[in-house]
Amino acid sequence: EQLSCELQCARSLPHLVVHPLFKVLERHSYISLQRLAFGAIKWRNLACDDSLFFPSEVATHLYFVVDGKLLYTKANGVSERVDRSEDWIAEPVLWTQSWIHLGTLKAMSESDLVLIEGEKFGNIIGRSPHIFQLVRNYAHVFMDWMNSQPFESLSDISQGEDVSDMLQTFIEEAMIEKCHQQHSNNGEASIP
């Protein structure tokens, strides 16, 4: 089973690290990534013209494009291409149980994707208290930001070139908060 986890992780990781949080997980908890690869990650193939999801459907997975060309079209008709080397799809599914897709994602050519199931992601990350604390803090900052955005600007697509720097600051805030929480917990533990 260990070898299988390592192989799944080696196959998936190059596609996940376009997201800054997964780069941090790679540095701080490789075992969590191995567990994700074995227990929460699947692969999906789409033929040309296949749709992955439609507006108003309940989201279940975070997606990373491995190969192919995809087109995302919001309900209002605005379209954007999804790039395999820098974009990801439906991140809020990791942080909320109620993310609803806002558009249609369609393959413009044969495409391969890596999928992370939201519920399983939470269960696996929860196994490591320090990583869970970091990820939970990141999720709070991320959702505060999402909730502050006008609805019209929301999308299922995260354009890495547009949001990676901002997400890196969210991670830094989450790490600082984690340190404060650990310091507070250590202080409380010493009080009789």
Image: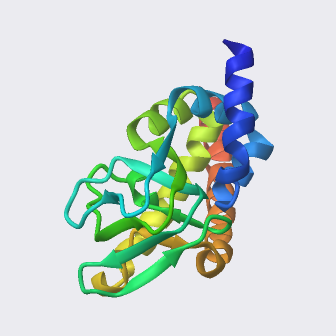
Where residue 164 sits, quadrant-wise, is bottom right
Question: Residue 20 vs residue 36: left or right?
Answer: right
Residue 128 seen in the current view: no
Q: Position of residue 115 (x, y in %)?
A: 49, 45
Left or right relative to 29: residue 99: left
**Residue at 48% from the left image edge and 47% from the top image edge:** 45
* Most distant residue in the right direction: 27
In front of the other: 164 or 161: 161
Horizontal side of 43 relative to 50 (left or right) equals: right
Q: Position of residue 170 (x, y in %)?
A: 61, 67
Residue 73, image x and y in percent?
A: 34, 77
Name the foreground residue: 98 vs 135: 98
Q: x%, y% of residue 162?
A: 60, 81
The reply to whether residue 174 is visible in this rendering is yes
Name the residue furthest left. Answer: 56
Residue sitting at the far top: 1
Total number of numbered labels? 0
> Which image quadrant: the N terminus?
top right
* Quadrant location, the C terminus: top right
Residue shown at 38% from the left, 53% from the top: 93
Question: Image point 44% across, 33% down: which residue?
Answer: 120
Q: Nearer the viewer, residue 5 or 92?
A: 5
Q: Residue at (65%, 55%) from the top-left corner?
A: 21
